[in-house]
Amino acid sequence: MLVLQNVLGDYTAIKAQDVQIVDTLGSFQTLSFSFVATPENEVAAKMMIPMTVIEVPENKQKYRLLTANSAKVGSYLQYSVTAVHIAKDMHRYYRESRLPQAQSLKACLDFMFQGTPFNYVITGDFANFYFSEGFGENFVDELLTQCANDFKFEYYFDNYTLHIAKQIGKDESFVYVDNVNCAKIAVSENYESIATHIIGYSNPKQSDGESSSTETTYEQRIDYTSPIVESANWPVIDATPVKYDQTLDRETLLARMKASLQDYPQVQYTIDSVNFKKFTRIKNDIAIGNQGWLRDRFGIDVKIRISALTWYPQDLSKTDAITFGNVMVDPVTWSIRNKRAFEQNFKLGRKLQQDIRKQQGLYEKTLKNQNAMSRDLAEQAKVISRLQNQLKDIEDAGNYWVSERQFIELSQSVGDLDLSWYSTLQDKEIHGAMIDLTSGNTDLNELFNSQRINIVKSGSKFIGVVHELRAKTTADAVTEANWALEQLRKNDVNVNVIVACKISNDSLPQEKRTLTAIVQAFNKTLSDAGYKNTCDFSAFDWFNDRFTSSARYRWVIYEGEEKPANADAWQFKKNFDNKNISCNKSYNSIFV
């Protein structure tokens, strides 16, 4: 049950389904839900109008209605609704004037919030900041982002109250142990943004009034090289220099430079929270910014911080998802942990080999005895088979994933190629295939099953399926998703494979917000049905200009020379083997 309030102050309750809250560090919370306009929801349906406020009883937070899309289902209309936290109302206010250059954080907030319903609470002390061109002439939400960057603070909203601290959240607030209080731990590591050297400038020189140069010069310059260069034998990698148009002492400038330098891998952990009784032995305090510990199946402890939550407050049957960003994992620690995991696997593998040899000897001895009972032979065979399977699991776990493995995309237009062609793929460094399955709400790749069978027979990986999106509305997107689901189930496609939504059709809506909602509706329908490895598949410029990605993974079409940023997979060639087949590189083990 949710509570609605329109602009006139009238209230009503609404019986909603699929109530989802997404909370991300540094962003406004979003709310989405659906409902059917039955007689009990008739008033609520009429309040799906601009300026309506939605309150969620479980967290007592208010959200401003953004979109309300409806489609006929039986005798009633079904609505799909999105909303954003009431804090986004800050964008209603524009400050035309500017404050002078040197300002305190309190002065900036008073300037921003004057005449608005917003107030603030500051925890901790913040030094004044020197704004080279003053502070103002922007929307209040944009000014808040500027303040957060300049004064170096984090924040969250409790309805109209802004809470500010150097770092929000509590420490030592949770522990997640693999297979004790969580079912699955996924890890994503990104190394492309690492830098080990940075130059910093501060204390701008005063102009003497005679110089014609407009370039700012600085009295203080510091070179800093991370100790990782010496301790881990990493190369010197330059970061973009940082410049501060204010007077700073050496220690302060150096501290800001170190904070700007990312000399460690970006490591992100994701778990699916579960509700089964066996996973309730450890109680946790879950909130954005909170810090705690995660222990994986190798017994390795990692200090992590909650960076995003996806929460279903009114449906205990749905699994909440928690995303963690690492607090600090330097390259030395990271490499030691990987080595430790490998050594543990290696030792266990050697022990299993010894056990196999021992059991094999007993088995062969039993075979020589013609009077041995058949059930003894069967038991020995079972033991050997079990140990061999365990050894294979350990060996598989010890194989490190390799970035930039290549895979192809197959479609009906490729034709029915025979198995001999598929058998050459691994020689051509192709490790798997994504296969087109559906398009729109009726079209189907009739060759899907034969292509999947041939890929598997050739020893390559069947990665997942592709659906080409053609929807004009969110209701159309749900219809297309249900068509894709019908074919996935009809063809016994496992829920753990990737389901990619191809967003490239020229007929798709031009407005970014509309297309974003359509893509979100498609991915959500797939995810709710169990296919949680959703993937947005589109051109690089579309990710930036046409829609905001909502899937778990990003597959980017890009004709440049280097991998596009934030891509889990990159389509870099369109004519593999002269057969109009696209070729792709994997940057996430979920692909190949």
Image (cartoon, rainbow, N blue to C red):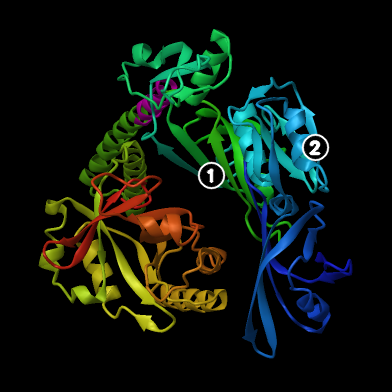
Between 514 and 170, the one nearer to me in the picture: 514
* Alpha carbon distance from label 1 to label 2: 32 Å
Residue depicted at 67% across the width and 51% down the height = 29
What stretch of residues is rendered in magenta? 331-345
As displayed, is residue 309 above or below residue 336? Answer: below
Q: Is residue 534 visible?
A: no
Give residue 261's position: percent from left, percent from top: 46, 24
Q: Which residue is mark 2?
A: 120
Q: Which residue is mark 1?
A: 270
| The N terminus: image quadrant | bottom right
Residue depicted at 52% across the width and 17% down the height = 204
- In which quadrant of the rendered view does residue 182 lie? top right
- Dot 1: what SS? strand
Give residue 198's position: percent from left, percent from top: 41, 20
Residue depicted at 29% across the width and 48% down the height = 372
Amino acid beneath label 2: Tyr
Amino acid beneath label 1: Thr
- Dot 2: what SS? strand
Q: Is residue 6 visible?
A: yes
Q: Is residue 297 left or right of residue 537?
A: right
As displayed, is residue 256 above or below residue 326? Answer: above
Label annotation for residue 441: none
Give residue 512's position: percent from left, percent from top: 51, 64
Between 402 and 584, the one nearer to me in the picture: 584
Give residue 506's position: percent from left, percent from top: 37, 73
Magenta span main SS: helix
Q: Is residue 525 left or right of residue 141?
A: left
